[in-house]
Amino acid sequence: MTGYGRAAVENEGLRIACEVRGVNHKGLDVHMILPPALLCHELACRRVIREKIARGHVDVRANLEFLGEEAVEVRYA
């Protein structure tokens, strides 16, 4: 298993970009680099990764960018 993916979304004054790289590995080894504003979501991200990927070395890098000067409301579902 070797793969690479990149996605970005822009909504309500925020832009979030994420890159995921995976290579073959015996077990599941997830390495995440998140901006400070997203660190509180690390466990939820790891849970989603474990549900989708059974094995491999997975590197996840996320970037959060605030656009403009509008106030941003954060809602948890």
Image (cartoon, rainbow, N blue to C red):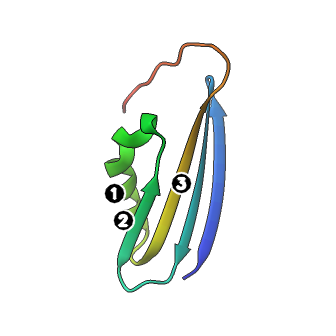
The kind of residue tagged 1 is: Arg
Mark 1: secondary structure: helix
C-beta proximity under 8 Å, tags 2 and 1: yes
Q: CA distance from mark 1 to mark 3?
A: 16 Å
Give above or below for 51 relative to 61.
Answer: below
Q: Is residue 67 above or below residue 41?
A: above
Label 2 element class: helix
Q: Secondary structure at mark 3?
A: strand
**Mark 1 or mark 3: which is in front?**
3
> x%, y% of residue 53?
43, 71
**Would residue 43 appear left or right of 3 to someone viewing this image?**
left
Any mark on residue 36, and which?
Answer: none
| Rendered image: mark on residue 50 | 2
Q: Position of residue 1 (x, y in %)?
A: 54, 82
What numbered label is drawn on residue 47? Answer: 1
Question: Which residue occupies 49% across, 83% down?
Answer: 24
Q: Earlier in the sequence, mark 2 or mark 3?
A: 2
Residue type (three-letter) at the residue carrying disc 2? Arg
Counting residues from the start of the chain, the first of labels 1 and 3 encountered is 1
Residue 15 point in image, percent of width and height: 63, 35
